[in-house]
Amino acid sequence: MSMSDQEDVRRLADLRQWLEERTKQLEDELAMLRQTATLVDEQLKRSSFVKATEVPVAPRPAALPEGEEAAAKEEVKAVVQGETRPLKRQKDGYLLANAYVEPNVVTIVPAADVVLRSTTPPFKTYLIGKVLTGMRDADEEQAKQGKIARDRLISFEYEEDSGRIVKIIVRNYNDRLRLNEILSTTTWTFTKMLEKQA
């Protein structure tokens, strides 16, 4: 076999490996999308059953007037005040982290025995780069259209200690549905990170 033939074989082998890795990434992402869709469906089912006495007589305006923004924040506050939600691995119920939910801030802290590094995929590429940044971009677009105030834009940060993730803080998640999406995608991301670190 000539040098050029060997080079071609090596390139094809590299390409094959890349295809396998990319296929796995896409399959994982599809699984996450399906899980998120299930959560959305469950939330819609829960939200669509309302007592007749709770149905408003007059239709609400499409956009909330400024005075009603505070009422909307109070509604979120009433639902999630001081809640702690464990994030567990789906296959065996292993505790990955705890989410401490306040009126409009959620702090996610990995469990004491879970060591997760920010450099491990898909933390920066998926959770930070796609999910949370995607939510921020959507909020910025809503703010440009005057649908939400700029001080209600989602923001996020994470703290590390020698590369180990100590906590993730998300502010202005704004509603229960988005909170559930953040927690489910974090659970999935942490699960994948542990697999890669094993």
Image (cartoon, helix red, strand yellow):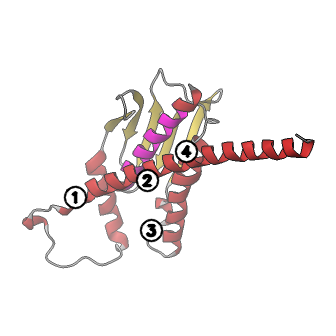
The secondary element bearing badge 3 is classed as: loop
Q: CA distance from mark 1 to mark 4?
A: 32 Å
Type of amino acid under label 4: Lys
Q: Nearer the viewer, residue 128 or 82?
A: 128
Q: Which of the marked residues, 1 or 4, is nearer the chain's N terminus?
A: 4
Q: Magenta residues?
A: 178-194
Determine contact: label 1, label 4, CB under 8 Å. no
Q: Residue at x 64, y 30 (%)?
A: 163
- How far from the left and from the top, in percent, is residue 151? 49, 61
Q: Is residue 12 left or right of residue 76?
A: right
Q: CA distance from mark 3 to mark 1?
A: 26 Å
User: Is 63 above or below relative to 54?
Assistant: below
Q: Nearer the viewer, mark 3 or mark 1?
A: 1
- Judge from the rendering whether residue 50 lies leftward or rightward of residue 161; answer left or right: left
Instruction: State the residue in front, 140 or 177.
Output: 177
Q: Quadrant of residue 92?
A: top left
- Position in image of residue 18 (x %, y %): 67, 45
Instruction: Identify residue for label 4.
Output: 24
Residue 45 circle label: 1
The mark lying in front, picked from 1 and 2, is 2
Instruction: Tell me the kind of residue under disc 2.
Output: Leu
> Where is residue 94 shown, x and y percent of the image?
38, 27
In the rendered structure, which disc, 3 or 1, sits on the residue that comes first in sequence?
A: 1
Name the residue nearer the viewer: 194 or 17: 17
On residue 29, the disc is none
Mark positioned earlier in the residue sequence (3 or 4)? 4
Q: CA distance from mark 3 to mark 4?
A: 37 Å
Looking at the image, which residue is at 34% across and 72% down?
Answer: 64
